[in-house]
Image (spheres, rainbow, N blue to C red):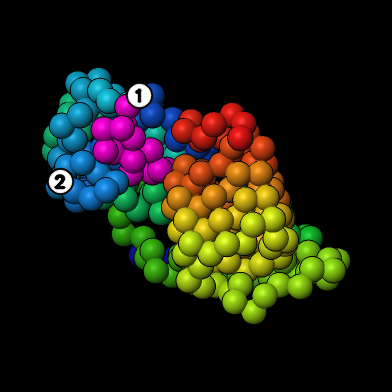
Amino acid sequence: MPFTSNDSTASSAPVLDRQSLRPDCSNCFALCCTALGFSRTSDFAIDKPAGTPCKNLDTGFSCTIHDSLRPRGFRGCTVFDCFGAGQNVSQNLFQGASWKAEPATSKDMFQTFKIVRQLHEMLWYLAEAAGRTFDPDTSHQVNDLRRAIEKAMGGVQQTLSLDLGSTHERVRSILMSVSEEVRSAYLATGDDHLDSWLVPGADLMGKTMKSRSLCGADLRGAYLIAADMRGCNLSGADLLGADLRDARLEGADLSKSLYLTQAQLNAAHGDGCTRLPSELDIPAHWPSNS
Ligand code: SF4
């Protein structure tokens, strides 16, 4: 089904705010532990085919090793974020009937989860874009798009037939536009000079940037694996899709960074002095102070 934002419900506010886009595992049929597959790597201790329950899942859809995932070799599980897709698919789209209770629905449920997760991730970014743009017209456009995406998830078959590619394109375009606007504001007011290598998709693996001002930097899709960003100011820095695995964020200020996710934080190292946006939590494995 082609994606269009013209059929959005004209004046209603988007329903899914950022709080609704946080995972609620207690209302999910462990869809991430079942629908998705993973291979044995440093992030997952076992191979698990997609569409099969993980061997660590109990009969009540809970993980039996939840409190020891990292030491048991399941770090990947601690950095995954479904953006609230799990509870939406389980409770709304499949009306509280699990894949275990209704095995015939499992294939559609798992596929729907994979699609809804992507749509919820887009909604997470769009919710931020709506609040960060200084232009009321742009804010309206963003909210139109949010409503259209919500409407596109109105039913299972409707969701399964959605043209994800065109949805991605619409979202990407408006996120970039808001990013440019926000970053320009930071760059225009600061005395800081950004190095020419701070560009989207840059390979900054292991790079030492300690205590630098990265305000307004476009780090979209950058490889920041194990980069040392301790004490950096990342206000207005676009971090969309940046790979922050093992990045050092102790004492860094990310409170006004753009398009940051919980999954990115969970993959990084920080401490009690790392400043975060109010919607995001300090990961459980971070020490409370340095
Ligand atoms: S180890 Fe636990 S959290 Fe990870 S997939 Fe298996 S059941 Fe889910």
Query: In the rendered view, would you say 270 is above or below 166?
Result: above
Query: For mark 1, does the 10 Å Cα neighbourhood hold few (<14), some (14 to 19), or many (20 or more) residues?
Result: few
Mark identifier at residue 47: 2
The residue pinned by badge 1 equals 67
Give the x, y percent position of residue 250: 60, 44
- From the viewer's perspective, is 102 left or right of 281? left
| Label 2 lies in ligand 1 vicinity (Cβ under 8 Å) | no
User: Label 2: how many residues lie within 10 Å, few (<14), some (14-19) or many (20+)?
Assistant: few
Q: Nearer the viewer, residue 228 or 86?
A: 228
Query: Is the Cβ of the residue at disc 2 closer than 8 Å to that at disc 1?
Result: no
Of the 4 image quadrants, the one containing the N terminus is bottom left
Residue 255 or residue 118, whichever sits in front: 255
Measured along the vertical axis of the image, is residue 133 above or below residue 103?
A: below
Is 189 on the left or on the right of 211, as rendered?
right
Residues shaded magenta: 67-82
Above or below: residue 106 compared with residue 100: below
Q: Where is residue 118 shown, x and y percent of the image?
A: 41, 54
x and y percent of residue 253 in the render?
69, 48
Instruction: Identify the mark nearer the N-term, 2 or 1.
Output: 2
Name the residue at 32% across, 50% down.
Answer: 114
- Residue at 38%, 43% (x, y): give it: 80
Question: Hey, what amino acid is under mark 1?
Answer: Asp
Residue 75 drawn in magenta: yes
In 3D space, how far apart are the residues under numbered discs 2 and 1 (Cα atoms)?
Answer: 20 Å
| Identity, as a three-letter code, of the amino acid under mark 2 | Asp
